[in-house]
Image: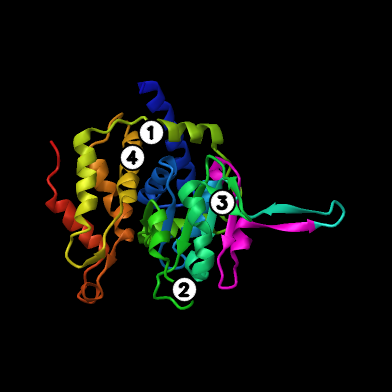
């Protein structure tokens, strides 16, 4: 890959990052991960307490890219047809006409996804896995930019349904925003004293530029030794103490692609071990199912992945 291609793609990344940071203060790491997922063709699950800016982050990204954006507020009474669409009979033409649901968009915000029933949650499985949906026996392709940002409140909250393992595995990354430092929170208050910064946001990147960014990520080189390093990390979760269900090969693919995106953001045309290590926890941890006894003893998925990273030798 030419240096000019990497430079151009990195400029797109930096433009979008700068635009989002006007709204999301003190969240540089979260923005970096979000854009890594989009550039690598994955989807993102944001889990955190209410009011930490999950929905605002998704909106800021959508407003930064000249693309179509739709939001679905997940509730217990939401049906799969509310997401995918439905055919309605046209009396004048005496035919059924399909009305597309919000899934037919470039960027989809699935807000509070774990408040809907498992049946409705599963409506996104095919869309996220294959960029298509099957409705009434017909397959319909989604856009080449299709990107899902889902938010969920912690599962201990009332009125939530835990996402099934198959659904969790469809998300390339899961991470939290957390609370910002007090100084940044003061800046947030000042920025929103009169109006929300989202109201003045303008697109800074075109769909063509984002697609070029995704193509540039695919051209980042990764050595055979580092591919084996990725596989060794993921495979170690399947035999780790306290883990009932380890990560699948889909996790290996997601980790490789996310590391490629991070390498591009860093201005490199090849992946290094540090990019793999940076993304390992947010790519792998949410896919693990721990044994009940291990959870009660204080073990968590993040700690399992961090322990594996310390044990697996880093290729030289």
Give the CA distance from mark 2 to mark 4. Answer: 33 Å
Q: Nearer the viewer, residue 210 or 89?
A: 89
The first of marks 3 and 1 along the sequence is 3
Q: Nearer the viewer, residue 142 or 271?
A: 142
| Mark 2–mark 1 CB contact (< 8 Å) | no
**Numbered label attached to residue 40:** none
Position above or below: 15 against 123? above
The first of marks 4 and 1 along the sequence is 1
Query: Could you tell me which secondary element the residue under label 3 belongs to?
Result: strand
Position above or below: 57 against 13? below
Q: Give the quarter of the figure containing the C terminus.
A: top left
Residue holding disc 4:
262
- At label 3, counting other C-alpha atoms closer than 10 Å, the crowd grade (few under 14, some 14-19, many 20 or more) is many
Residue holding disc 3:
133
Residue holding disc 2:
160
Q: Is residue 195 something that shows in the picture?
A: no
Give the CA distance from mark 3 to mark 2. Answer: 25 Å
- At label 4, counting other C-alpha atoms closer than 10 Å, the crowd grade (few under 14, some 14-19, many 20 or more) is many
Give the CA distance from mark 4 to mark 1. Answer: 12 Å
Nearer to us: label 3 or label 4: 3
Lateral position of residue 242 relative to residue 103, left or right? left
């Amino acid at each position: 890959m030419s240096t000019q291609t990497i430079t151009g793609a990195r400029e797109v990344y930096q433009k979008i990052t700068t635009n989002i940071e006007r709204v999301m203060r003190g969240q540089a790491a979260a923005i970096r991960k979000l854009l890594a997922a989009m550039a690598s063709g994955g989807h993102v699950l944001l889990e955190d307490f209410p009011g930490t800016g999950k929905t605002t982050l998704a909106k800021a990204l959508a407003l930064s890219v000249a693309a179509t954006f739709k939001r679905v507020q997940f509730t217990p009474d939401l049906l799969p047809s509310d997401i995918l669409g439905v055919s309605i009979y046209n009396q004048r033409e005496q035919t059924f006409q399909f009305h597309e649901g919000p899934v037919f968009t470039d960027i989809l915000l699935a807000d509070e996804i774990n408040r809907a029933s498992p049946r409705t949650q599963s409506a996104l499985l095919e869309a996220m896995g294959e960029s298509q949906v099957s409705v009434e026996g017909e397959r319909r392709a989604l856009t080449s930019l299709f990107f899902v940002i889902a938010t969920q409140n912690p599962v201990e909250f009332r009125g939530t349904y835990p996402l099934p393992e198959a659904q969790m595995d469809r998300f390339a990354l899961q991470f939290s925003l957390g609370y910002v430092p007090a100084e940044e929170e003061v800046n947030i208050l000042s920025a929103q004293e009169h109006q929300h910064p989202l109201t003045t946001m303008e697109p800074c990147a075109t769909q063509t530029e984002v697609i070029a960014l995704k193509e540039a990520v695919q051209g980042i080189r990764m050595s055979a030794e580092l591919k084996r390093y990725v596989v060794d990390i993921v495979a170690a979760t399947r035999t780790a103490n306290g883990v009932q269900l380890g990560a699948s090969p889909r996790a290996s693919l997601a980790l490789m692609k996310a590391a490629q995106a991070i390498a591009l953001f860093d201005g490199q045309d090849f992946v290094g071990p540090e990019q793999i290590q940076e993304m390992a926890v947010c790519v792998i941890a949410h896919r693990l199912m721990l044994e009940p006894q291990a959870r009660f003893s204080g073990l968590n998925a993040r700690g399992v992945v961090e322990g594996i990273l310390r044990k697996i030798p880093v290729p030289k």
